[in-house]
Image: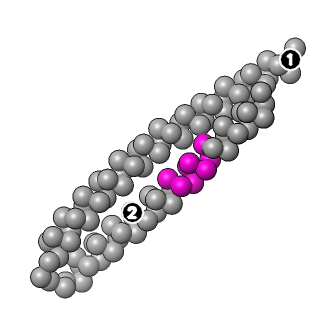
């Protein structure tokens, strides 16, 4: 009986972790959209100039965009693994 109770707790906790992953993923997607807007604005400002600082700003925003995409991929994998584990538990 104790095993069933513990398994239920593990399943619920794992489901909560997967849900939190989904929430975080939505936040990352919003940050990615904001970053895309920032990049569009920076590129518009940079048109006609090749100043080092605006180029640096664009480069850093592009890096941020790439890292957010990487984070989204990792979170999706984590949530999928948590759901699979919950399935194993019952």
The image position of residue 53, as x and y in percent, is: 23, 78
- Stretch in magenta: 72-79
Residue sitting at 47 percent across and 43 percent down?
Answer: 24
Q: Which residue is mark 1?
A: 2
Q: Which residue is mark 2?
A: 65
Foreground tag (1 vs 2): 2
In reply to whether residue 10 is colored magenta, the answer given is no
Secondary structure under tag 1 reads helix
Q: Earlier in the sequence, mark 1 or mark 2?
A: 1
Residue sitting at 71 percent across and 28 percent down?
Answer: 11
Residue sitting at 19 percent across and 83 percent down?
Answer: 51
Task: Identify the main secondary structure in magenta.
Answer: helix
Secondary structure under tag 2 reads helix
Local packing at callout 1 (Cα closer than 10 Å; few below 14, some 14-19, many 20+) is: few
The image position of residue 52, as x and y in percent, is: 24, 83
Q: Is residue 19 above or below residue 46?
A: above
State the separation of the CA atoms marked 1 and 2. 47 Å
For the C terminus, give its image quadrant.
Answer: top right
Q: Is residue 74 above or below residue 48?
A: above
In reply to whether residue 76 is colored magenta, the answer given is yes
Left or right: where 61 falls relative to 81: left
For the N terminus, give its image quadrant.
Answer: top right
Q: Nearer the viewer, residue 73 or 10?
A: 73
Q: Quadrant of residue 35?
A: bottom left
Q: Is residue 65 above or below residue 43?
A: above
Are the two marked residues, 1 and 2, in contact with CB atoms closer than 8 angstroms? no
Q: Is residue 38 above or below residue 30?
A: below
The image position of residue 38, as x and y in percent, is: 25, 61
């Amino acid at each position: 009986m104790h095993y069933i109770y513990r398994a239920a707790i593990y399943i619920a906790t794992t489901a909560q972790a997967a849900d939190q992953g989904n929430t975080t993923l939505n936040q990352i997607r919003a940050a990615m959209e904001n970053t895309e807007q920032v990049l569009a604005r920076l590129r518009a400002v940079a048109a006609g100039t090749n100043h080092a600082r605006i180029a640096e700003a664009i480069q850093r925003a592009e890096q941020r965009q790439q890292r957010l995409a990487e984070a989204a991929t990792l979170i999706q994998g984590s949530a999928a693994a948590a759901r699979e584990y919950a399935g194993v538990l019952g």
